[in-house]
Amino acid sequence: MPLLQIVMVLVVVGVLLWLVNRFIPMQGTIKSILNAVVVIVVVLWLLNVFGFLHSLSRIHVGA
């Protein structure tokens, strides 16, 4: 995936999250949970795009 496409996805996600936070009235705790979920999903997506998530599947714990 080209770097420009990754940056564009991050910008779109950021703008959408900003729009939701700015214009949709919701309770503060729900807004915090939504922000945390979006950040976690974006971080996992970035790890997958750069191949770090795939390399973690080869790690075995225990027997």
Image (spheres, rainbow, N blue to C red):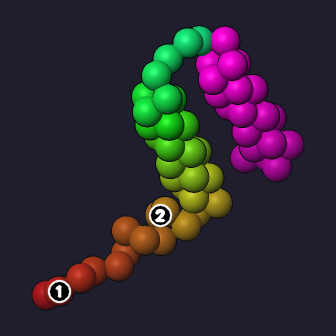
* Residue placed furthest toward the bottom: 63
Q: Is residue 50 magenta?
A: no
Tell me which residue sits at (57%, 58%) in the image: 47
Dominant SS of magenta comes to helix
Query: In the displayed structure, would residue 9 be above or below residue 19?
Result: below
Between disc 2 and disc 1, whose residue precedes?
A: 2
Which residues fall within the magenta stretch? 1-23
Q: Position of residue 38 (x, y in %)?
A: 54, 38
- Residue furthest toward the left? 63
Q: Is residue 21 shown above or below 56?
A: above
Residue occupying image coordinates x 50% and y 37%:
32
Residue denoted by label 2: 54
Nearer to the camera, 24 or 50? 24
17 above or below 58? above
Q: Identify the residue shown where x is 24% and y is 82%.
A: 61
**Closer to the eye: label 2 or 1:** 1
- Within 10 Å of disc 2 (Cα), the crowding (few <14, some 14-19, many 20+) is few
Report the front residue among 8 and 18: 18
